[in-house]
Image: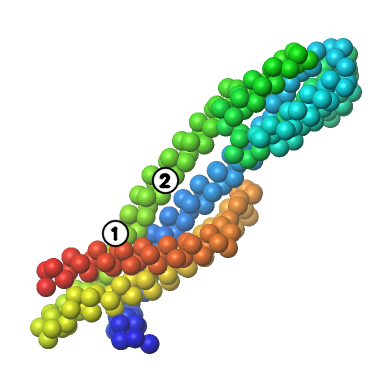
Amino acid sequence: MSLSTREAFVAFRRAPLLSALSVTTIAFSLFAFGLFGLVALNIRQALQTVEERVEIRGFVIDGSAGEDVTAAAGLIGKYPEVQRVEVVTPEEALERAREEMGEFRDVFESAFLPTAIEVRLKPGFRDPTAVKRVATKMRGFEIVEDVRYGEDWITQLYRIRNIAGATGVVLGLAFATVAIIIIGATIRMAMLARAKEIAIMRLVGATDGFIRRPFLIEGAIKGTLGGTLALLLTWCATMLIERYLRFDTVFFDGRMAVLGVLAGALIGVLGSMVSVGRQLRRV
């Protein structure tokens, strides 16, 4: 174990209550950040689920030959944006309508339901521009009478997604900044408690890097502990929400959880760096 690491752990033993307060404060600041991240993740998941339902329907002119419909579906299926193409006959459309709206099952008749070509797009090609591009190509087939894809609905969906993404970035940076300030304040308290020791080290010729290193390690340790505790608190909050509010929520996967803890360590280092730099300039 290096001297700097040893000094960082000695600082924990010298002021256990201050260290515990620091870790707890960091944990709650990162907990707020984690809750926001969890909300953003679930909103993204919900939007992605809705996005997967985006489809284009091309309605075929009555009396079109089955071979022409199959050929058109085959050509559409070769578009780079297309994931899946399905030809829906009037009988199949009737069965679907009766299943989805059972209370009106006696109203539907296959006579007024046309053959349709249903197109599902690949992930990354479900934005309004890509959907409209495929719909325009489908309108070029002579057997296609009309193409519908809910243009207004898709536009609103992506507008909501873009707003949610921009809001997430802004609020995420705000929470991260607050966390850095809080961590920097806790490290500064530790430095103030050791101001005389730092001044003596300066007098005997210690470099700024030598003085700064233990505090950076201390900040990383506190950030890691705080991040781990924040992750645990976020998981507990998720369990409470699912149990009492009956919401099905998505929690961070293993990779995101590890990145969250590492982010806590990074924020701890940044907070320490800012605080130590200010304090060293005053000594």
Of the pair 143 and 33, the residue shown nearer to us: 143
Residue 116 visible in this rendered orientation of the protein: yes
Which is more toward the observer, 279 or 34?
279
Q: Sequence-wise, which precedes: disc 2 or disc 1?
A: 2
Checking the image for residue 28, the label placed there is: none
Quadrant holding the C terminus: bottom left
Say which quadrant the N terminus sits in. bottom left
* Residue at screen point 50% across, 47% down: 40
Label 2 sits on residue? 169
Residue drawn at the location 56% of the way across and 27% of the way down: 129
Residue 222: % across, % down = 37, 71
Residue type at the position of mark 2: Val
Please tell me in which quadrant of the rendered image residue 170 appears.
top left
Q: Amino acid at mark 1?
A: Ile
Q: Position of residue 269 (x, y in %)?
A: 33, 67
Q: Is 111 situated left or right of 253 in this image? A: right
Q: Position of residue 9 (x, y in %)?
A: 34, 83
List the residue tagged with mark 1: 181
Residue 98, image quadrant: top right
Residue at x 30%, y 82% (from the top left corner): 4
Estimate how packed mark 2 is, as few (under 14), some (14 to 19) or many (20 or more) residues with alpha carbons within 10 Å.
few
Residue 94 in sight from this viewpoint: no
Q: CA distance from mark 2 to mark 1?
A: 18 Å
- Residue 138, placed above or below residue 239: above
